[in-house]
Image: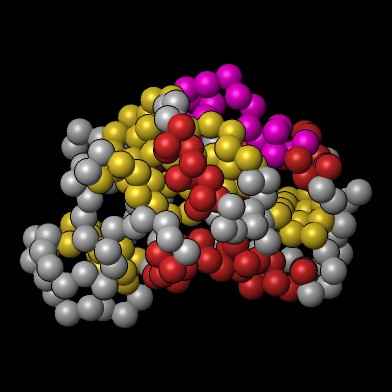
Amino acid sequence: MSGVLIYTLQEAKRNAFSVEKYKKFLGIKLVDENYRGDADFVINRTNDYRIGEFFENKGIRVFNPSSLSRLANDKQLCYEFMEKNGVDIMPVNYKGAPVVKKKTDGSGGKQVYLLDKAEPFEEGYVYQKPCDTLGKDLRVWVIGGEIITSVLRESKTDFRSNFCLGGGATPYTLSNEERKFVEKAVNLVSCDYAGFDFLFNNGRLVFNEIEDTVGARMVYSVSDIDIIKLYCDYIKNNV
C-alpha cells in the first residue's frame, strides 16, 4: 500500500515530530496541498475538505473523510448540526454581552475574541454566549469512533485554554454521564482521528467544536499513549 500525507509546508514544519511518526509507521510520502497524483490512501491534514473530496471522487480512501472535514471546519454549521441532533451547545447567533466572537473556520484558539459589548454580526464569524467557566475546557481524542483519552486544558491568564497558547494540560477521567454525552456527539459523525472539545457550563459538559487535524502534543506530554501509532494501526486495518 502506498499512501500520501498531505500538509501545507508551514504545518509540516510545525508538526515535524508527527510527520516522522507517520513515515515510520506507514512508510508514507509527505506531499503538499497541491498534490493531485496517485495514492492508495490519503491522510489529509490541511482542514480543506475539498482536497478530501477530490481523492474520494477517484475512489481513494481519505482519512478523515471530507464530510468530517467540512463539518469540523465550519463552526456555525457544526453548532447547528449538533444542536439539531440534541447535543448541548452554548447558544450561537448571540446578541447579548459579553460574547465570544470566533472565526468560522479558525483553529488553535486563533481569531477568537471575548467582547464586553455586542456588535453587528460580521460575516465569517460565530457569535456565541460564553460558558460560565472561562479558561477551562476538555479535549477528547477519538480514533474510529472510540474514545482514546481525555485531557483537561486550563489557563490562568486567558479565557482560551489552548495548549498552544500556553494553557496547562492534565489527564482527565470522564464520568459515566460525561462519557455518554461525549459518545452521543462522537456517534453523530464519521471520523477516523479527531479531537472533540467540550466546555464546562453549570458543572456539565457542553459541546464546543471538532478538531479535524487534531494535534498530539498534549497526549505525549501527559501520558505514555503513542496515539499516532494507534492511528497508523487503525489506518492499516481500514485501507
Front residue of 15/191: it is 191
Does 49 sit left or right of 97 as displayed?
right
Compared across the picture, whether 61 is left or right of 19 comes to right
Q: Residue at x 59, y 33 (%)?
A: 148
Picture coordinates of residue 87, whole percent (x, y): 42, 57
- Which quarter of the picture shows residue 4? bottom right
Asked whether, in this view, residue 178 is left or right of residue 30, the answer is left
> Is 133 displayed left or right of 116 in the figure?
right
Give the quadrant of residue 114. bottom left
Question: Which range of residues does the magenta coloring cover?
Answer: 217-233
Q: Nearer the viewer, residue 97 or 168?
A: 97
Judge by depth and name the residue closer to the eye, 189 or 36.
189
Residue 34 visible to an observer of this rendering: no
Q: Residue at x 64, y 73 (%)?
A: 50
* Colour pattern: secondary structure
Dominant SS of magenta comes to helix
Residue at horizontal 49 percent and vertical 41 percent from the top = 180
Q: Residue furthest left?
A: 117
Q: Is 47 covered by the magenta stretch?
A: no
Q: Is residue 232 magenta?
A: yes
The answer to whether residue 104 is above or below residue 139 is below
Asked whether the viewer can see residue 198, the reply is yes
* x, y percent for residue 13: 57, 45
Q: Which residue is farthest right?
A: 1
Q: Residue at x 32, y 71 (%)?
A: 125
Residue farthest along the top direction in this orientation? 224
Quick check: 80 above or below 153? below
Q: How many marks?
A: 0
